[in-house]
Amino acid sequence: MTDGQHVRMEIDGGVAVVTMAKRPHNLLDGVFLNSLVEAFESAADSGGRVILLRSDMEHFSAGADVDGFGGDEQRSLPAAEILDRLENVGLPTIAAVHGLALGGGFEVALACDFIMAGTSARLGLVETTLGLIPLLGGVQRVVQRAGTARGKEIVMFGRRHDPAVLERWGVINVVVADEELDAASMSWARQLATGPTVSYAAVKQLAATAANEGVRAADLRQEQIAEPVWASADLQTGLQAFAESGAGSAFFEGK
C-alpha cells in the first residue's frame, strides 16, 4: 500500500483503489493534485489493472482550496499536465462519486474514463458564481460529453446537478443507490481488471484521438495503436479460449 498524507493507493486484487482522504472535504491544492497524479501513475507498477478513485470523506471533493495555492511548496503541476497525466494513464479509470463533487472536484472525476454516482451526490462546475471559469478542463470535458449547448448550461449557470440529470445528458455513466456505490463501483472495477488491459489502453488512445482531433485522425492511427494488441498475451488467451469453447463456428454462423 502506498500511503500519502491525503491520497492513499492500495491494490485489491487487480484493482488499484485510490482514496482521497484530506479533511474535511478533500479540497484541492497543489500537493493534493500532485499526489493524485503520482498515485494514478504508480498503479500499474504496483500490479493494478484498473484504477478506482473514491473518497473517505463526507464528500468526493468540494472543490479547490484557494488558500492552498500560494507558496512554492504548494505549487501544482500545470493544469494541462495534470489532465494529460490523469487521463492518459494506461489503465481504465472509474470515479465513484458521493456527496459533493464541485468545481475542481468534479473536474477530477471528468478526467476519469467512467463516473458512477450515488443518488444523493451533487455535481457542478460552480466557478462562474465567483466570477471565475473552471481551470482544470471542466468546460472542455462537459462539452465533449454533453454537447456544446448542455456544456455551456452546466458551466454558465453554475448549478449543483442531480446525478440522474447528468446521466441523461451523458456526463456520467450510471447512478446507483448511495448504499450500493462502493459495491457497484468495485464490481465494475473487478470486471475491467479481469479484461484485456492492452486492448483497453488502445481503446483509450483511439477515443482520445477521435475526441481531440477527429475520427479521421483516429482512423489514420488505428493500425499503429493496435500493434501492441496483436502482440498481447491477452489476445492469445482470448483466441484460444474462443476456439476451445466451440463458440467460433456459432459466431460465424450467426447463432
Image (tube, rainbow, N blue to C red):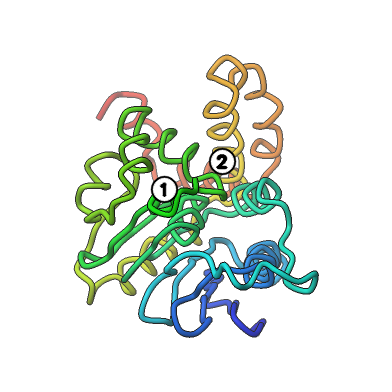
Q: CA distance from mark 2 to mark 1?
A: 31 Å
* Pointer 1 local density, CA inside 10 Å: few below 14, some 14–19, many at least 20: some
Q: Residue at x 36, y 40 (%)?
A: 156
Location of mark 2 (residue): 204
Q: Is residue 174 above or below residue 13?
A: above
* Position in image of residue 253 (x %, y %): 31, 24
Q: Is residue 234 above or below residue 148?
A: below
* Pointer 2 local density, CA inside 10 Å: few below 14, some 14–19, many at least 20: some
Q: Secondary structure at mark 1?
A: helix
**55 with respect to 66 (left or right):** left
Residue type indicated by callout 1? Thr
Q: Secondary structure at mark 2?
A: helix
Location of mark 1 (residue): 128
* Position in image of residue 106 (x %, y %): 43, 57
Q: Residue at x 36, y 80 (%)?
A: 58
* Furthest residue in direction front, as rendered: 131
